[in-house]
Image (cartoon, rainbow, N blue to C red):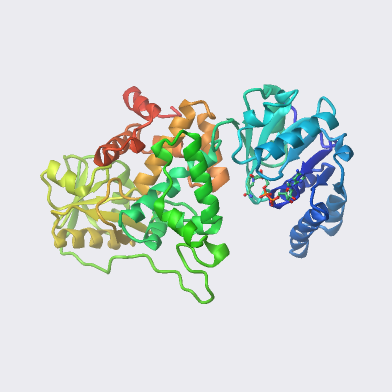
C-alpha cells in the first residue's frame, strides 16, 4: 500500500503535548500541516513549541536554518474547522473524552471530503466506540503516537470494528514513510503497549508490597540484570503515578476486572498522598533539591575456599554465566546431574518459579540458592539471588563469592516465587501471548511495539523463545501454584508451545 503523497495536507486538531508533536512529525516528513485548537492562541503556541524544539537542533549544527524555516512555513495554525477541508488526513489529539471526540468526528464528517482519512490519537478510548455514531466509521482509524511524538518511534495503528483494511494499511504506510515504526492492532483496551506492559509495573509493585526488597534494589535489578532502560519505580515516578494508576485501573476495569491487571494498593497510596513522582517532587524517590537517590542493597564482598565450580548437567540459560565464571579464571568441573551449579556449600539453580524454600524441600537440597534471570548473563552487572530458609549462611556466602568473582553485584531478595527479572519477563510474555491469542496484533508486531514504544531490550515473545519453549510456562505454572491465584494462569499459547516443542517464531 502506498503512503499518502507528500503533497497531501495533514490536519492536526488539538495543539497540546501530543498534537504539536504530531504536527512536527508530519511537517518534517514534508507535508503541509494545519494545526487547530479551540483554545485561543494554542495552535500558534504549538507551532512556537516546534520551532523551539528544532532550533536546538539548528544550534547544534544538526539542522540547517533554512530547512527549519521551510518546515515552520509548512505548519499553518488555523481557527476554523472549515479551513482544513482540503486535508487528506485529519488526526485528532484533543481531550480524552468520548463525547467530545464524537462531536468533533461528526463535524469533521460534515466538513471534509469523502476520501479524507480521520484518525484519532486516543490512548484509551475504543476506536469502535468513537466510530459508532459516524456516518462512515470505515474511514476512522486509530493513530496512536507515543510521547514525545517526534522522538518515540512507535505508532499503533488501531482498527475499530468498522475500520477499512485499506485505510489502516494506508495510515500504516504513511507512518512508516514518516520514519516511524508502525504496528497494526485491533481496538481492544490498552491496545498493545498499554496492555502488555502492565506486569512490568505490577509485579515489582507487588514484590515491594511483599517486602521482597526495597524500590531502589528492584529498580537496579531490573536495569542491571534485566537490561531494561529504567526500573519500574523510577519510570512510574517519571510518568506520574496518577497517570500510570489511571491507565492500570482503566485496563483492569475494561477487562471486567481480570485479576491479571489488578491495580496496586502501594501505588494508590502514593496517588492519595499526592506523591505523583517527579512532577510533585516526591514519588517513590524524593526529587527535592540535593536529595540523593537511595543505593540498591548489595551484598558485601565475600570470599570462599571453594576451588572449582561443579556444573551438574545442562545449566540451560545459565550456560553464559558458566562461561563468564570460566573466563574469570575459575576451574569448571562438568558432570551429569539435574542442571545446577555447586560452589562450596552453595547449590545454585535458575529460578523455575517456585520459592527456594519449597524447591529445597522437594529436591532435598537444603543449601539451595536460586539465581534470577538476566537479559544477558555475559554482561549483567547485577543479579538477584534468594536462598531457601533451610540454607546455611555459608551457602549464601559462597553464592555471593562466586558471582562477585565474575564482577557481578549481588542483591539478595526475600524468597518470593520467580524472583524479579524472571517474574517480570514471564508475566510480560504471558500477557503478550494472550494478546496474540486474542488477535490484538501479530506476534512480531507485539514484540516490535514493546521495543519501539518502551525501549524493552527484547520483545517478550522473542525473549520467551530465546529462553526455550517451555521455561516460562513452567515458571508461570509454579508461580500460579505458589499463590493459588488466577492472575498467573499461563497463557494458552505458552502451553501450546511447550507441547509442540516450538517457539513463537519457529
Ligand atoms: P493536552 O491537554 O496537552 O492537549 C489537548 C489539546 O486539545 C488542548 O490544547 C485543548 O485546548 C485542545 N482541545 C480540547 N478539546 C478540543 C476541541 N474540541 N477542539 C479543538 N481542540 C481541543 O493533551 P495531550 O496530552 O496532548 O493528549 C491529547 C490526546 O492524545 C488525548 O486523546 C490523549 O489520550 C492522547 N495521548 C496522550 C499521550 C500523552 O502521553 N500525553 C500519549 C498518547 C496519546
Asked whether 416 or 270 is in front, the reply is 270
In the image, residue 201 lies at what x, y percent? 44, 49
- The residue positioned 44% from the left and 54% from the top of the image is 267
Q: Name the outermost residue toward the left.
A: 364
Task: Using the image as rendered, state which of residue 228 and residue 93 is in the foreground.
Answer: 93
Q: Position of residue 18 (x, y in %)?
A: 69, 48
Is 274 left or right of 427, judged from the image as shown?
right
Which image quarter is the C terminus in?
top left
Q: Position of residue 55 (x, y in %)?
A: 78, 61
Q: Is residue 147 left or right of residue 78?
A: left
Residue at 72%, 51% in the rendered image: 16
Q: Specify the quadrant that holds the N terminus.
A: top right
The relative height of residue 374 versus residue 442 in the rendered view (above or below) is below
Foreground residue among 382 and 31: 31
- Which residue sits at x=77%, y=55%? 50
Q: Which corner quadrant of the image does residue 159 belong to?
A: top right
Residue 467 in view (yes/no): yes
* Quarter of the image where one finds residue 56: bottom right
In the foreground, 486 or 173: 486
User: Residue at the spot x=62%, y=23% of the render?
Assistant: 161
Instruction: Single out the residue that lies furthest toward the bottom.
Output: 290
Residue 169 position in % (x across, y down): 68, 27
Q: Is residue 159 visible?
A: no
Amino acid at each position: 500500500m502506498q503512503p499518502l503523497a507528500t503533497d497531501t495536507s495533514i490536519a492536526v486538531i488539538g495543539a497540546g503535548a501530543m498534537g504539536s508533536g504530531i504536527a512536527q512529525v508530519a511537517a518534517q516528513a514534508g507535508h503541509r500541516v494545519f494545526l487547530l485548537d479551540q483554545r485561543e492562541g494554542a495552535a500558534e503556541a504549538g507551532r512556537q513549541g516546534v520551532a523551539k524544539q528544532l532550533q536546538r537542533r539548528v544550534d547544534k549544527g544538526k539542522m540547517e536554518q533554512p530547512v527549519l524555516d521551510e518546515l515552520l512555513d509548512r505548519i499553518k495554525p488555523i481557527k476554523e474547522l472549515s479551513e482544513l477541508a482540503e486535508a487528506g488526513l485529519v488526526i485528532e489529539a484533543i481531550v480524552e473524552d468520548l463525547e467530545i471526540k464524537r462531536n468533533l468526528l461528526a463535524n469533521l464528517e460534515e466538513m471534509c471530503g469523502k476520501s479524507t482519512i480521520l484518525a484519532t490519537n486516543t490512548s484509551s478510548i475504543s476506536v469502535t466506540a468513537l466510530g459508532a455514531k459516524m456516518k462512515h466509521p470505515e474511514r476512522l482509524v486509530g493513530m496512536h503516537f507515543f510521547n514525545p511524538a517526534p522522538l518515540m518511534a512507535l505508532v499503533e495503528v488501531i482498527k475499530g470494528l468498522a475500520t477499512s483494511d485499506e485505510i489502516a494499511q494506508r495510515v500504516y504506510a504513511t507512518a512508516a514513510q514518516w520514519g516511524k515504526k508502525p504496528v497494526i492492532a485491533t481496538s481492544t483496551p490498552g491496545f498493545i503497549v498499554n496492555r502488555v506492559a502492565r506486569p512490568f509495573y505490577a509485579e515489582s509493585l507487588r514484590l515491594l508490597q511483599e517486602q521482597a526488597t526495597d524500590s531502589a534494589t528492584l529498580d537496579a535489578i531490573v536495569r542491571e540484570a534485566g537490561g531494561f532502560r529504567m526500573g519500574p519505580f523510577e519510570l512510574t515516578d517519571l510518568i506520574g503515578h496518577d497517570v500510570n494508576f489511571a491507565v492500570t485501573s482503566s485496563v483492569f476495569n475494561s477487562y471486567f476486572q481480570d485479576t491479571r491487571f489488578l491495580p496496586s494498593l502501594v501505588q494508590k497510596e502514593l496517588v492519595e498522598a499526592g506523591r505523583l513522582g517527579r512532577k510533585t517532587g516526591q514519588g517513590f524517590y524524593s526529587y527535592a533539591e540535593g536529595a540523593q537517590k537511595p543505593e540498591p542493597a548489595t551484598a558485601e564482598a565475600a570470599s570462599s575456599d571453594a576451588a572449582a565450580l561443579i556444573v551438574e548437567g545442562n545449566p540451560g540459560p545459565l550456560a553464559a554465566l558458566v562461561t563468564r565464571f570460566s573466563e574469570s579464571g575459575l576451574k569448571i568441573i562438568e558432570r551429569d546431574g539435574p542442571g545446577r551449579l555447586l560452589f562450596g556449600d552453595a547449590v545454585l539453580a535458575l529460578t523455575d518459579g517456585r520459592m527456594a524454600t519449597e524447591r529445597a524441600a522437594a529436591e532435598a537440597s537444603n543449601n539451595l540458592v536460586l539465581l534470577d534471570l538476566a537479559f544477558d548473563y555475559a554482561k549483567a552487572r547485577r543479579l538477584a539471588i534468594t536462598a531457601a530458609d533451610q540454607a546455611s549462611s555459608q551457602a549464601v556466602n559462597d553464592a555471593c563469592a562466586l558471582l562477585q568473582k565474575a564482577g557481578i553485584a549481588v542483591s539478595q531478595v526475600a524468597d518470593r516465587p520467580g524472583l524479579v527479572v524472571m517474574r517480570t519477563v514471564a508475566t510480560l510474555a504471558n500477557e503478550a501471548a494472550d494478546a496474540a491469542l486474542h488477535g490484538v496484533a501479530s506476534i512480531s508486531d507485539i514484540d516490535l511495539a514493546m521495543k519501539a514504544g518502551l525501549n524493552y531490550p527484547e520483545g517478550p515473545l522473542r525473549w520467551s523463545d530465546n529462553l526455550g519453549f517451555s521455561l516460562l510456562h513452567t515458571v508461570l505454572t509454579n508461580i500460579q501454584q505458589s499463590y493459588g491465584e488466577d492472575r498467573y494462569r499461563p497463557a494458552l499459547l505458552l502451553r501450546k508451545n511447550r507441547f509442540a516443542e516450538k517457539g513463537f517464531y519457529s
